[in-house]
Amino acid sequence: IPAKGPLMIRLGQYYEGSSFGHCLDARVKIIATLLFSLLIFYARGWNILLISGFLFAVCRVSRLNFIRILEAGKTIIWFALLLFALHIFFTAGSPLCVIPYLNFTITAEGVTRGLLVSWQFVALAYSGIILTMITSPTDLVHGLEFILRPLRHIRVPVSEIALMVSMALRFVPTILEEYDRIKTAQLARGSEMETARYDRRIKIMSALLLPLAVSVFRRAEELAQAMEARNYTGGPRTSFHQQHFGREEIIALFFLGLLVSLVVFIKYRC
């Protein structure tokens, strides 16, 4: 579902545009994202700044609004903070300070490790978010199907896997909208979800899971019935929009190769 104007961008939602990033071949963007993810796992020291700067440059080239990007992954920030807290409290090492009454010791290794893991988690998540924001679900599925095509020789159902990925991406905004609808309905019925204490909020939030699960299964059943009514069958499919490989893709691969070279050089020479 493309979003236009001031509408909020949700996780996994495509943002329509005509920028350099939007016009790139989906196969190049998928391969670049996978390679970028590997670089994130091995990044240390100055490579962290280099990869973060490259991610920032991709956002600028793709003409993405940073507020929209933060909105799309705002829940990711809370998970990153949780990862950071777990590392600073439960990682052994040289003590920095002791929290009174809680008997927790914050260590230098815990802070360093927590910052690294949190950054890796956020960078991985936002690289995937940017991919889905600048690549339509149809192009993403066809690109993924092309990349996985060699697996057909060992009888892997590539087309079905690509279809499942497509439906999963399309269901993410739908599930989030359904969650907001159920939450609004419970607030209208006097729920204390936003005013209760945190322990009480957790219990109230758990009450949302059952109706949300029922709604998800209902929508999945409706989708299956719609596919059966249209006589959907598995197997190779054709696409009206043919993917191309031109000058823009060569430029993108050049800068990606330059990034990889710099990361490797900094890692083993500095």
Image (tube, helix red, strand yellow):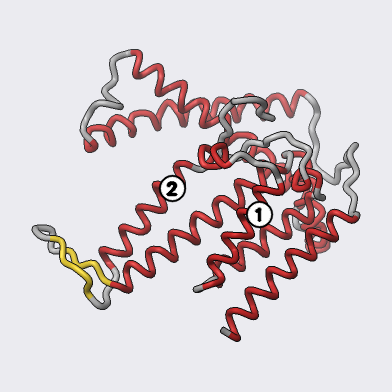
Q: Residue at x 27, y 66 (%)?
A: 90
Q: Residue at x 85, y 46 (%)?
A: 236
Judged left or right of residue 221, residue 74 is left
For residue 57, the mark is 1
Q: Residue 38 appears at what percent x and percent y?
A: 61, 67
Q: Residue at x 54, y 38 (%)?
A: 67
Q: Residue 206 appears at what percent x and percent y?
A: 33, 34
The image quadrant of residue 85 is bottom left
Q: Residue furthest top?
A: 189
Q: Residue 54 appears at what percent x and percent y?
A: 64, 60
Foreground of the two, 185 or 221: 185
Label located before the other in sequence (2 or 1): 1
Disc 2 marks which residue? 77
| Kind of residue indicated by mark 2 | Ile
The local crowd at label 2, few if under 14, some if 14 to 19, many if 20 or more residues have their Cα within 10 Å, is some
Judged left or right of residue 28, residue 260 is left
Q: Residue 42 appears at what percent x and percent y?
A: 55, 72
